[in-house]
């Protein structure tokens, strides 16, 4: 095997309790006018008031857009931009969950290059650098603070769409786990399960590094030596602390582990990409209107089981990172134990065990399989290939809760 590595990351990553207090000094490196994207919930908190006061005391003038909606509806981006154009910001600061960070990326893009969000759907459509983005996550899951993608819900399309470009990577990711302390258990679980799915899918992704032109042709290029490093770190941290953070949100050390795990997972999949669990979630989410993290986590054990013939060794490594004892019975036995542990962990934090429990109607199984198979950027990243019959078997197995049916 030829050693191959690729990684695209922010210029600066700052992580630790209290890091939110250095935001004024970080912002001052980019200018004196900051357009701030958040949502109504976080805008009403004392933490947000404290952050704005700190920026004001640091001589940073701010304009706040606090109407970001989940999944960033396409037409809401135009309303956000209309508020900012006359302000002429030097930077955009996204504060909140993944949608707030994605809105900040979209704002920076359109304020810099004009047009509409749909002009940039797909890979490498952003023509050049944008206004610098400072990403300040308040949840621990999406990894959007370090990734090159912004996800949008478009009313003209059944499935959510992405704008993917290295130019969308935030200039600074500023991660303070204290900002996640008020996340309720359900959000902690959904976001953390999303992060663990990112890490496992990045680590078990197809290895496609033979062509040196690959990173110039694709934003997501499959697993590599560097993305593996980040993915395993994420798996270790989430494996030891996600359940604790879910059960006791006041545990600061567990909160820090989960946020660092989400960050590391973002560093992994932001270059490696994700795979079939994400491909199936897109149509499932469109039908069930359930959270992204719920859908990908529900699918992950079934996808891991489907991938066993092609990725048993990697899945066994995931188990080691989760803290499972290696009993010497070989990679296949360790891989099966790993899938059982992922299923156990997700069950413990309230993730539905199958697509039926998630709310997918049985008569949409074939449609879901057809839609998932059409998401080429994710399907080609899966270590075991798919045809339509195989995808239908996977979705049916995940609907029925029959893990053994994925191995046919």
Image: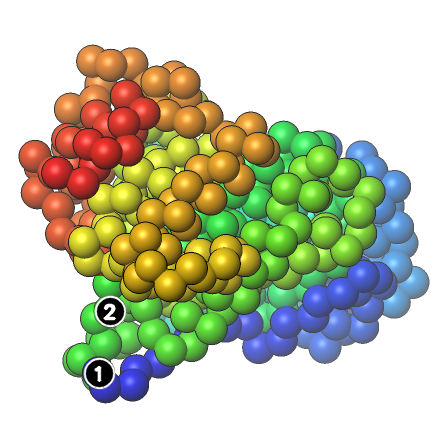
Q: In this view, does 339 lie above or below 380?
A: above
Relative image position of residue 146 (x, y in whole percent)? 53, 63
222 left or right, relative to 257: left
Give the CA separation, mark 2 to mark 1: 10 Å
Q: Give whichever of 98, 358 is nearer the camera.
A: 358
Q: In which image quadrant can residue 69 be found? A: top right
Question: Which residue reaches farthest front?
Answer: 328
345 left or right, relative to 217: right
Q: Can residue 195 be seen in this view?
A: yes
- Closest to the camera, between mark 2 and mark 1, is 1
Relative image position of residue 231 (x, y in whole percent)? 46, 64
Quarter of the C terminus within the rendering = top left
Q: Give whichever of 138, 341 is nearer the camera.
A: 341
Relative image position of residue 45 (x, y in whole percent)? 82, 38
On the image, numbered disc 1 is attached to which residue? 1
- Secondary structure type for disc 1: loop
Query: Which residue occupies 76% across, 40% down?
Result: 249
Dot 1, how many residues are within 10 Å of its Cα: few (below 14), some (14-19), or many (20+)? few
Relative image position of residue 157 (x, y in whole percent)? 28, 32
Sequence-first tag of 2 and 1: 1
359 left or right, relative to 83: left
On the image, numbered disc 2 is attached to which residue? 207
Question: Could you tell me if the residues under marks 2 and 1 are in contact, i.e. CB atoms within 8 Å?
Answer: yes
348 left or right, relative to 95: left
Question: Which residue reaches farthest right?
Answer: 57
């Amino acid at each position: 095997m030829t050693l191959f590595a690729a990684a695209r990351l922010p210029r600066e990553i700052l992580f630790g309790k209290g890091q939110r207090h250095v935001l004024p000094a970080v912002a001052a490196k980019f200018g004196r006018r900051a357009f701030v994207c958040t949502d109504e919930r976080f805008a009403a908190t004392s933490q947000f008031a404290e952050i704005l006061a700190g920026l004001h005391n640091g001589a940073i003038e701010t304009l706040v857009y606090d109407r970001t909606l989940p999944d960033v509806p396409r037409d809401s981006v135009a309303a956000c931009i209309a508020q900012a154009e006359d302000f002429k910001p030097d930077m955009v600061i996204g504060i909140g969950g993944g949608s707030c960070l994605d809105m900040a990326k979209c704002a920076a893009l359109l304020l810099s290059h004009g047009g509409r969000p749909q002009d940039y759907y797909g890979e490498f459509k952003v023509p050049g650098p944008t206004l610098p983005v400072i990403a300040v996550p308040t949840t621990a899951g999406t990894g959007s603070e370090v990734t090159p993608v912004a996800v949008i819900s478009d009313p003209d399309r059944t499935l959510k769409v992405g704008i993917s470009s290295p130019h969308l990577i935030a200039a600074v990711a500023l991660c303070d786990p204290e900002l996640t302390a008020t996340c309720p258990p359900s959000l902690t679980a959904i976001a953390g399960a999303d992060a663990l799915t990112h890490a496992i899918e990045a680590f078990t992704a197809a290895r496609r590094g033979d062509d040196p032109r690959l990173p110039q042709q694709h934003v997501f290029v499959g697993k590599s030596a560097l993305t593996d490093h980040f993915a395993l770190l994420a798996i270790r941290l989430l494996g030891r602390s996600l359940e604790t953070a879910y059960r006791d949100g006041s545990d600061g050390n567990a909160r820090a582990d989960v946020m660092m795990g989400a960050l590391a997972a973002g560093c992994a999949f932001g270059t490696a990409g994700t795979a079939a669990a994400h491909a199936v979630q897109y149509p499932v989410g469109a039908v069930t209107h359930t959270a992204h993290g719920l859908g990908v986590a529900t699918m992950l054990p079934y996808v891991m089981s489907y991938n066993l013939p092609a990725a048993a060794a990697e899945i066994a490594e995931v188990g080691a990172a989760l803290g499972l004892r290696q009993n010497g019975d070989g990679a296949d036995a360790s891989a099966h134990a790993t899938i059982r542990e992922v299923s156990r962990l997700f069950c413990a934090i309230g993730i539905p065990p199958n697509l039926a429990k998630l709310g997918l109607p049985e008569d949409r199984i074939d449609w879901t399989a057809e839609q998932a198979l059409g998401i080429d950027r994710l399907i080609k990243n899966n270590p075991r290939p798919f045809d339509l019959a195989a995808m239908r078997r996977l979705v049916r197995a995940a609907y029925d809760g029959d893990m053994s049916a994925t191995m046919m």
